[in-house]
Amino acid sequence: MLYDLKGDASMSSTVGILYSAVRENHQRLQLITDGMSQDELEYKGPDSNFNSTAQLINHIMYVDFNWIFRIKEQPLPTSLEKQYGPMLDVNNRLPKVKDMSLESLMCEYESVLTMVKDTCEQLTDPDLDRVVTFGRNNENQATIRWGLWHIADHNRYHQAHINQLRKWYGEDLCEN
């Protein structure tokens, strides 16, 4: 297998490289979650005080949606906010996700990746210098370049949490 960050032919050079990093991390997420049972998907760690894989995948999608609409200079649609949000619940934790299958989550995440691709196809390399705001009160600024990189990096960051949950889940199965 050849690994490369070659962009899509429908995208400008640097945009394509950034999109390929997003796509690769999406594929990696599919690989590391493959074969998860519903119980494992909802597992919250040895003492049930961590975010589940389902919560983490939902969170990744929510963050990606926010960046997609930020890049498009549009507000996040209320329907997406209701379906995937909020960023944090009243207890400052990721919202609960129950009774949603891995297949459903990954199918929804595939549609997010399609939206990222469609958005990237509309961007040119000079667009990457455009600055957008983000944060709870839009107190932070970033270039679109950084935003696309963040989509890929944020996904991979939470993959480490999912890998740890899988390890703990396997250990808990062996103990019981």
Image (cartoon, rainbow, N blue to C red):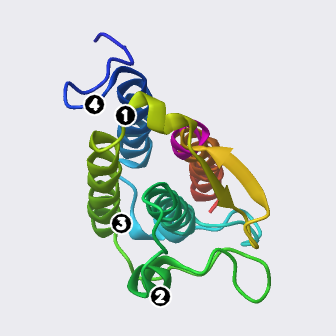
Alpha-carbon distance for marks 1 and 2? 31 Å
Q: Mark 2 or mark 4: which is in front? A: 4
Q: Residue at x 35, y 50 (%)?
A: 116
The amino acid type of the residue labelled 2 equals: Lys
Question: Pointers 1 and 2 in contact (CB under 8 A)?
Answer: no
**Of helix, strand and loop, which mostly describes the magenta segment?**
helix
Residue 11 occupies quadrant: top left
Identify the magenta region.
Answer: 145-151
Local secondary structure at mark 2? helix
Quadrant for the C terminus in the image = bottom right
Q: Pointer 1: what residue?
A: 124
Q: Which mark is residue 105?
A: 3
Count residues near mark 3 (Cα–Cα under 10 Å), then give few for <14, some for 14-19, many for 20+: some
Magenta run includes residue 122: no
Alpha-carbon distance for marks 1 and 3? 31 Å
Alpha-carbon distance for marks 3 and 2? 16 Å
